[in-house]
Image: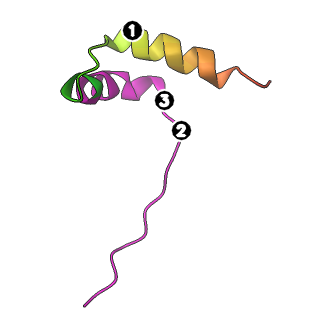
Amino acid sequence: MSTPPPFMLRSATPADAAEIARLSHELGYPVTPEQVSAANRSTSTRGR
């Protein structure tokens, strides 16, 4: 049995908003890419 390749996690970027919105909708949480972008801006400035 082979070992699966390692993976990296990274912070979301504005370019990810459409895909995050699509996945969120798939999970039952409909949001627009604009809402995702606004939430990402809001959380990325916390603690600074």
- Tell which of 36 and 26 is nearer to you: 26
Above or below residue 21? Residue 1 is below
Q: Which residue is mark 1?
A: 34
Above or below residue 12? Residue 29 is above
Type of the residue with mark 3: Thr
Which residue is found at the position 50% from the left and 10% from the top?
A: 38
Spot occupied by residue 32 in the image (x, y as percentages of width and height): 31, 10
- Tell which of 24 and 14 is nearer to you: 24
**Residues marked 2 and 3 touching at CB (< 8 Å):** yes
* Sequence-first disc among 3 and 1: 3
Pick out the residue farthest to the bottom: 1
Q: Which residue is mark 2?
A: 11
Q: Which residue is mark 3?
A: 13
**Residues marked 3 and 1 touching at CB (< 8 Å):** no
Pick out the residue farthest to the front: 28
Taking the image as shown, residue 26 lies to the left or right of residue 10, namely: left
Pick out the residue farthest to the left: 26
- The part of the chain drawn in magenta is 1-23
Q: CA distance from mark 2 to mark 1?
A: 17 Å
Residue 21, quarter of the rendered image: top left
Taking the image as shown, residue 44 lies to the left or right of residue 19, namely: right
Q: Which mark is residue 14?
A: none
Spot occupied by residue 45 in the image (x, y as percentages of width and height): 69, 20
